[in-house]
Amino acid sequence: MSGGSEPPDMYHVLLAIDGNNERLERQLDTLESLPGREEIRVTVLYVHEELDVPGGPATIIESINRELDELQGVPDVVYDAVDALDELGIETETATQVGKPAERILDAADELDVDVILIAGRNRSPAGKAIFGSVTQGVILDSGHPVLVAS
């Protein structure tokens, strides 16, 4: 037995957000309802859509997309999420990426070895509730991690 006490394992949530405040609110409500909030840490991920440049070499396109990410900066919704999580007393870090959102979310989940991905589907008509937005559907279908969809 060691003399010091080790901190308990934190439950790592990847909070994949877009620019929609209503979906963010649903995600935050879902996160707030999880048990053991004091043992949760969250990585807030925002994915900038990549710029599609036809016919250009991959390295040039990659460079343009990195520069685009730097120019676009971090959207206000990321700061809103961090502020709300801070008020809840949840340890938070942020990440931004450029690319196809579903792919970047899945890559980040793997790289960070998260316990769960928290996303929000788009609002649909009653008949369309079984169908999620394309990003949500892509993450659900291709993830090797549990996915929690805020409703």
Image (cartoon, rainbow, N blue to C red):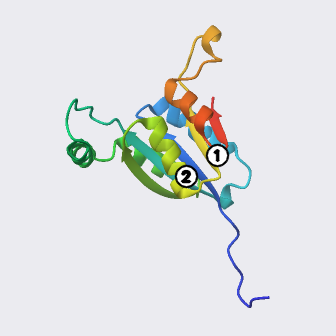
Extreme residue toward the right, this view: 1
The answer to which image quadrant residue 151 occupies is top right
Front residue of 28 and 145: 145
At which x and y percent is residue 117?
59, 44
Q: Which residue reaches farthest top?
A: 127
Tell me which residue sits at (24%, 47%) in the image: 59
Q: Tell me the crowding category of disc 2: few under 14, some 14 to 19, or many 20 or more residues within 10 angstroms, Cα based.
A: some
Task: Please give the name of the residue rendered at 22% of the width and 29% of the height, measured from the top-left corner.
Answer: 54
Q: Amino acid at mark 2?
A: Asp
In the displayed structure, 112 sits above or below 81; it is: below
The local secondary structure at tag 1 comes to: loop
Q: Could you give the CA–CA distance between mark 2 and mark 1, rounded to whole angstroms?
A: 8 Å
Q: Residues within 10 Å of mark 1 (few under 14, many from 20)?
A: some
User: Is residue 60 shown left or right of residue 131?
Assistant: left
Query: CB of mark 2 within 8 Å of CB of mark 1?
Result: yes
Residue 70, percent from left and from top: 25, 49
Q: Is residue 23 left or right of residue 18?
A: right
Residue 3 point in image, percent of width and height: 74, 91
Tell whether 40 sits left or right of 106: right
Q: Position of residue 94 (x, y in %)?
A: 44, 54
Q: Amino acid at mark 1?
A: His
The disc, 2 or 1, on the residue closer to the chain's N-terminal end is 2
Q: Where 121 sits versus 103, above or below?
A: above
Nearest the eye: 25 or 125: 125
Mark 2, residue position = 110
Regarding mark 2 in the picture, which secondary structure is present there?
A: helix
Q: Label for residue 114? A: none
* Quarter occupied by residue 137: top right
**Residue located at (49% from left, 50% from top):** 108
Give whichever of 51, 17 is nearer the camera.
51
The residue labelled by disc 1 is 145
Residue 104: name its quadrant: top left
